[in-house]
Structure formats: C-alpha cells, structure tokens
Amino acid sequence: MDLKITKRNRTLIIKIDGEIDHHTCEILRGEADSALEKMGGKNLIFRMGGVSFMDSSGIGAVIGRYKNIQRLGGRIAVAEANERVEQIFRLSAVQSLIPSFPNVDLALEYVEGGKE
C-alpha cells in the first residue's frame, strides 16, 4: 500500500494505492492519525481510486477515522472509489455514514461547505 497525504485548507486528503488489509491497515491508521495531528486538519478525504483490495480490516480503519473526525467536529468523505470499493461500502453499509463522491472537488465541497 502506498499513501500520499496532502492538505487543502483544513482538509487532509489521503490518496491510497494498493491493498488495505490486516497487514496494511495499521499503517493507514497510524499515518492518518499522525497527519491529522501534525497538520491540524479537521476534515478527511480518502481518495480510493487506486485501492485494489480491501477487507474488513480496511473497513474498520475507515470507520475508526470517521469516529476521530466526528470528535473533532469535522467531516469525512471518500472520493474516486472504484467499483470494487463502492461495492464493499454498500455491502457493509459504510456509505450510510461516509458519503462517496466521484472526484475530490465534490468531496471537498461536502466536507468544507457542509453540503449534504
């Protein structure tokens, strides 16, 4: 798994390429939490177009970040998820908590502008 972390305004954007499984989810959790603390971010967007595989550990990592962002009073979204990731989110009902958008700009509009 490869992570690229950027920040726009008060939103942390994490681009994920590769597999999110029980071997890599600890890295995702640690990097996301550390970057939120260092960068002072309030919102979080996961760019998941490059995710080739995700299991229940990955879902747990995403839900854990959702809970952290809620405590900060921010918002979280997913952008650019491929069909495989979208299906996993539908089957696990994650999309009822975390909205998914086709691109980063729409996700940014949601997390920063408060659009539902």
Image (tube, rainbow, N blue to C red):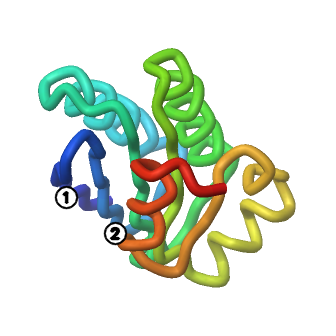
Q: Residues within 10 Å of mark 2 (few under 14, many from 20)?
A: some
CA–CA distance in space, label 2 to label 1: 9 Å
Residue type, mark 2 in image? Asp
109 or 45, which is in the foreground?
109
Q: Quadrant of residue 11?
A: top left
| Residue plotted at (52% across, 60% down) | 78
Assign a secondary structure to mark 1: strand
The percent coordinates of residue 56 (x first, y second) are: 69, 46
Which quarter of the figure is the N terminus placed in? Answer: bottom left
Taking 12 as reference, is 4 above or below it?
A: below
The number of numbered badges drawn on the structure is 2
Left/right placement of residue 81 relative to residue 84 reads left
Q: Which residue does the numbered mark 1 point to in the structure image?
A: 4
The percent coordinates of residue 45 (x first, y second) are: 41, 53
| Residue plotted at (66% across, 56% down) | 116
The percent coordinates of residue 109 (x first, y second) are: 43, 62
Query: Disc 2 vs disc 1: Cβ atoms closer than 8 Å?
Result: yes
63 or 109, which is in the foreground?
109
Q: Which residue does the numbered mark 2 point to in the structure image?
A: 17
In the rendered structure, which disc, 2 or 1, sits on the residue that comes first in sequence? 1
Left/right placement of residue 50 relative to residue 98 reads left
Assign a secondary structure to mark 2: strand
